[in-house]
Amino acid sequence: MPQNVLLAEDDRAIRHALERALTLEGYEVTAVADGVEALAQAHRTPPDVLVLDVMMPGIDGLQVCRVLRAEGDRTPILMLTALVETADRIAGLDAGADDYVVKPFDVEEVFARLRALLRRTGNGTGSGTGSGTG
């Protein structure tokens, strides 16, 4: 059964390209354009893993991450960002993200990081809560 990825990215070109690449890689992808949609979708149908852009209109990826973690959601989260400073990566990790990829990125690296996150957490059940100890 394919693992479900919730992709939240406000840049349409990046969102469509990544959605297509992930689908071709065998993932079931739900793509949204902002943090509000990401939270609503995560609550409606919990994914196996989230890929969140940091800078989105409305609720940004960091806030989505904080809200989910405050709710006790342990779903693996991979952050995408154009922000390259170490402090920005630290902010993402401190918000509860599990990993971080800086744009522009190689899609193969995104695939590898997703595989590692799913392997580490044992999250492949579609429950959205993860079965690993984190």
Image (cartoon, rainbow, N blue to C red):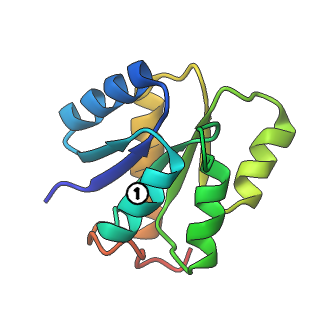
User: Is any atom of residue 109 visible in this view?
Assistant: yes
**Residue at position x 40%, y 57% from top?**
49
Identity of the amino acid at label 1?
Val
Task: Name the spot of residue 101 as percent of width and height, x first.
Answer: 59, 35
Q: Residue drawn at (25%, 28%), measured in percent from left and top?
A: 20
Rendered view: 47 above or below 34: below
Look at the image and tell me in which quarter the C terminus lies: bottom right
**Horizontal placement of 78 versus 2: left or right?**
right
Q: Badge 1 local density, few (<14 within 10 Å), some, or many (20+)? A: many
Q: Nearer the viewer, residue 126 or 134?
A: 126
**Residue at (42% x, 47% y) in the render:** 114
Image position of 67 with respect to 85: above or below = below
* Residue at the extreme left: 1
Coordinates of residue 98 in the picture (x, y in percent):
60, 57
Q: Which residue position is annotated with label 1?
A: 49
Residue at position x 34%, y 62% in the image:
47
Secondary structure under badge 1? strand
The quadrant of the rendering that contains the N terminus is bottom left
Q: Number of numbered discs present?
A: 1
